[in-house]
Image (cartoon, rainbow, N blue to C red):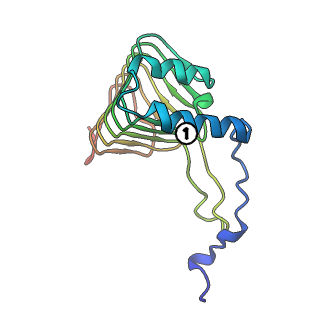
Amino acid sequence: MSAPAAGRRLRGFTGAGYDKQRGLLVQAAWFAALNLLFVKWWFPPRWRPALLRAFGARVGQRVLIRHRVRVQWPWKLAVGDDVWIGEGAWLINLEPITIESDVCVSQEAVLCTGSHQRHSPTFEFDNAPVRLERGCWVAARALVLRGVTVGAGAVVGAGAVAHRDLAPKAVLTAGGTR
């Protein structure tokens, strides 16, 4: 077998720098609740915030979470008041995700706090929090990457990729910032 590209040696991956903050039993209980209840169309949307709170999330009032929403670790999630999270959104929160009040995360949007050190031969983690400030909108199938803050009232348009901070009231489209 030939050597890995760019000297990559994934066998040596240690996972350094990533703390799940809960034991295996709690992680397993969350994955069971997520897959057996939380994502299902028949599970009432008004119960989803309560289930997240039961696993350590901080969730405000009048939060609407549609079905098929996935949350990696509820205990690393803070959501303000009057937030909407659309069908099929994915919150990959290896690090904290903070969603302030009056924010809309639309259908199939992804908030991803995880990445890898591309120059590391063992591809170690390079994670950082994501923050959505008050009144912003992450539109359908948009992607917000690790370490990004989406400023107050800003818009990450449908299909856009936010890989750096977005100023308040800025609009990022799939073609760039306006």
Q: Residue 13 location in percent, x, y?
A: 70, 63
The image quadrant of residue 119 is bottom right
Q: How many marks?
A: 1
- Which one is in front, 36 or 107? 36
Residue, x 60% and y 41% (percent of image)? 94
Residue, x 54% and y 42% (percent of image)? 113
The image quadrant of residue 9 is bottom right
- Which one is in front, 75 or 29? 29
Label 1: element kind:
loop
Residue, x 47% and y 31% (percent of image)? 37
Q: Residue 40 location in percent, x, y?
A: 40, 33
Q: Residue 165 location in percent, x, y?
A: 45, 37
Residue closest to the far bottom: 1
* Residue 75 appears in the picture as rendered: yes
Residue closest to the far top: 61
Callout 1 amino acid: Gln
Asked whether, in this view, residue 106 is left or right of residue 22, the answer is left
Which part of the image, by quadrant, shows the N terminus?
bottom right
Q: Residue 116 location in percent, x, y?
A: 59, 56
**Local crowd size for mark 1, using a 10 Å CA cut-off: few (<14), some (14–19), many (≥20):** some
**Above or below — where is 103 with respect to 90?**
above
Q: Which residue is mark 1?
A: 72
* Residue 100 appears in the picture as rendered: no
